[in-house]
Amino acid sequence: MEVNELQKIGVFVCWCGSNIAGTVDVAKVAETLKNEPGVVFSTDYQYMCSEAGQLIIKNAIKDNGLTGIVVCSCSPRMHEATFRKTAEAAGLNPYMVEIANVREQCSWIHKDMEEGTEKAIILGRSAVAKLNLNTPLIAGENPVTKRALVIGGGIAGIQTALDIADAGFEVDIVEKKQTIGGKMAQLDKTFPTLDCAACILTPKMVDASANDKITLYTYSEVDNVSGFVGNFTVDIRKKARYINTDVCTGCGACTEKCPSRKTPNEFNMGLDTRSAIFIPFAQAIPNIPSIDKNACLHFKTGKCGICQKTCGVNAIDFEQEDEIVTREYGAIVAATGFNPIKVDKFDEFQYSQSPDVVTSLELERIMNAAGPTKGKLVRPSDHKHPTDMVFIQCVGSRGESCREKGYCSKICCMYTAKHAMLIRDKYPDVNVHVFYIDVRTPGKNFDEFYRRAVEEYGVDYIKGMVGKVSTRSNGRLLVQGSDLLANEQLLLETDMVVLATAIEPDESVKDLATMLTASIDTNNFLTEAHAKLRPVESPTAGVFLSGVCQGPKDIPETVAQAGAAASKVIGLLCKDKLIANPCVAKSEELLCSGCSVCANVCPYGAITYEEKEVNDHGVRETRRLAQVNSAVCQGCGACTVACPSGAMDLQGFSTRQIMAEVDAICK
Amino acid sequence: MQKLRDEIVAKCKALLEDGTVDRVIGWEKGLFDYDCSPATFTKENIDELVYNEYCGSNLSKYLVKESKAEGNVAVLLKPCDTYSLNELLLEHRVKKEKIFVLGIPCGGMKDEKGELLMKCNTCKGNEHKIADEVMDSDLTVPEARDRFELVEKLDGMTPEERFAFWQGELSKCIRCNACRNVCPACTCLKCVFDNHASGIDSKANADSFEEKMFHIIRAFHVAGRCTDCGECSRVCPQGIPLHLFNRKYIKEINELYGEYQAGETEDSRPPLANFTKEDAEPSVIYEKGRD
């Protein structure tokens, strides 16, 4: 083993109460590691992270002149920062601290004391072997661009942007649709208080639009992201609206005159149609139309141009092209939201076959006063008043087949109770049945809300699943289901079936995750840095999460998370400089052959090449050499293993250090 | 062959005369007929250049040094040698603006016993992948056999048999470094085997295990970059079939990442020296590795 004779190492073994001491003989670990090369002090203590524990470390450093410490404790993700600060307070370089994870990777997974102890000793020994080769590292600093980018202009993005702007920072919202507002703008009422969604959302939309700190990029998408925390550069593609937005007054005359009126209206879930030049809804922000190129007669035939003739301010511009805007940001918030899943694979529910089978979001539009039926509840097939309605819960949620999601979509129980209650309130003659697996209503005033639907409004909740929906010759629907509590099969004739459809992250999140080097889980939800303790931060520094893109949640939760994400952003933008991670790659000039392998494998684009004069033991020549941008490097180490000559090495995790660890384990 | 040789010399003379190049990398006659060696020629000695069926050596690697020196240099490359040059250009080891590639035809090369070289049994064909000019000829390349035949045979062995096979072969190694020195993919300014700080330098004689590691590490270093030029096996004085290591890796890479021939083009990206979103996941490699 390589031993640095100048190192004086202290070993501190934590009991973590009984977490570690329960399956690891901590005293034996401390005693055994005392004999490792370089170790001059070794002890164990109940809670090393406690003030008393840290004092033991500080005193040992001072009393024994320690040059580095090994703490055998929990995962470095928990307390590495703590112990680095402890060491620093006692005058050590914080990178002379090594953590041997003897909890998550040892005591928690072993049951046998002897085995656990043996492994803890091996892990401690490898940390000592590495520390023997540690050198003090000095962290650099990077400036912070004091502007944030919020991707997605639904309630999550709007709230995040408002909160960031409120703290005095500039913030841009990029929204891919023509207007901000997102899914909430399509809703009728909101649970559990039943206030109108538009009444509480549109003031926030107006606030965002009027706030001079907020810039809206609607009908825009993120094309490219480069850089790193505090210093992102983002290309935003402003898609062509074919409207000069500077002069358009939003009078809407063009939308009324447009002869192409057969396109399914996306905002109304395709329940009615819209014109080729259109404004999605009355309170859209910005209140500016855009031309749907695929529907516009001018783009299809080269003729028409009625909108152009109608427009009083000459705002129509058929020649307009996409525009790329490049902006710099210190922080990025993903708030890309969700969509209901497509239910066309659920043939048993007849969604594709019968217009009277609708999704819950379609029902929202039917119930909405600004919707296709002006808020009047009618059967879509013949616009007659229904007398019976069946709601089916968990369509596509909590399933195991490939067409279903494994997770609970979380919001469906509550919005179904809301729909049932609203219908019973407005149309007491309509019988409402709800098929459910179980009703999930955790949340303030949520269960009370559900009970009101059952007890006060007489909604018929049936525990059981629906096997089949079929169309009868009289035009009504026949629902075959089971009532598990009564242990009987049910046949219900009904006018409408409403599917509580599972929700899934918006598909744009996949490309975005790649651009942001943020990770997504198997369901395409963005992953948080820590499920419990860092729920609004992504594992990539400077990238934060807001709303359903991180996991299913309702409006109150989304708004709370939006505020939390904003506070993390504000905390970041408040800083003038960020401490960089010194554990980054470094190229040894005299070993570099300039082959570019390292640059080719770098996922972050942190490596560039330059022609540089070197003096290689008296030979002066110009060579092509790898240069690492230490601010961009994330220390992943891909380059160090790709470099054939070993020129590339990772500071703090050098090849020698890692080999020393391996050797110590194999000893 | 003699006619072709004369035409090549005439072409080289013209290139030297009109100042296109200052030197030519070719072959000179050695002690014996079968002993043609790489050499650099100028106007003065260009007539000593030979080209016959014993010119098996791959000259592309000499460009690393020669293209750095004063003046321009021409190089004679057989079709299979051009793959190595593409790989060297890709890795910025040769200055393209300083070289002139004269593609020369090949009808298969022989060893000292007069038999077809191992690499010619799996001939890559008669197309030069990079050349400024290609000489005409009526030579036809030998028919190619399946290059993974032996690798599959080794794959079919039990681990014990395979270990015994390699132990038998590698115990012959005298660590002369000829395989590394001739390899066109081994062009690091400072080789890890010459660098004490790497922790793996010059340990061939420490124990029998280290000796195996030398060859395995070397094969790993060229994995994905090796064009399968076969020079390592050709120069091995002990006759160790070193190219089998490389072919094993080539076969694995083809299976995991799709067919890839290093040096096919000047701007390809070797699968192991590239980062893409479509990279095989570790789980895929793990699953495949279990088969």
Image (tube, coloured by chain):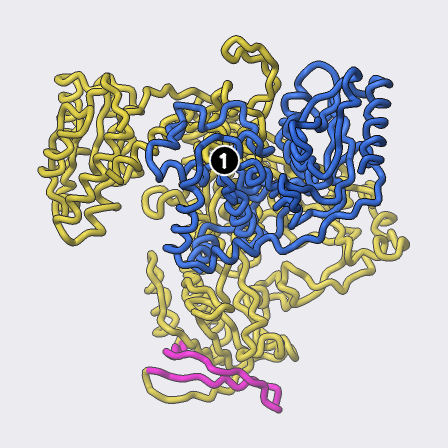
Chain colours: A yellow, B blue
Residue A43 picture location, percent across and down: 11, 31
Q: Nearer the viewer, residue A207 or A616?
A: A616
Q: Is residue B62 shown left or right of residue B210? A: right
Q: Is residue A333 shown left or right of residue A271? A: left
Which quadrant of the figure has residue A212? top right
Which quadrant of the figure has residue A77? top left
Disc 1 is attached to a residue of which chain? A
Q: Nearer the viewer, residue A501 or A587?
A: A587
Residue A637 picture location, percent across and down: 44, 34
Residue A492 picture location, percent across and down: 48, 86
Is A305 above or below relative to A361? above
- Give amino acid for label 1: Ala
Task: Read off the magenta span.
Answer: A459-484
**Which residue appears at 65% of the width and 26% of the height?**
B62
Q: Is residue A460 shown left or right of residue B221? A: left
Instruction: Please state the total of marks drawn on the protein image.
Output: 1
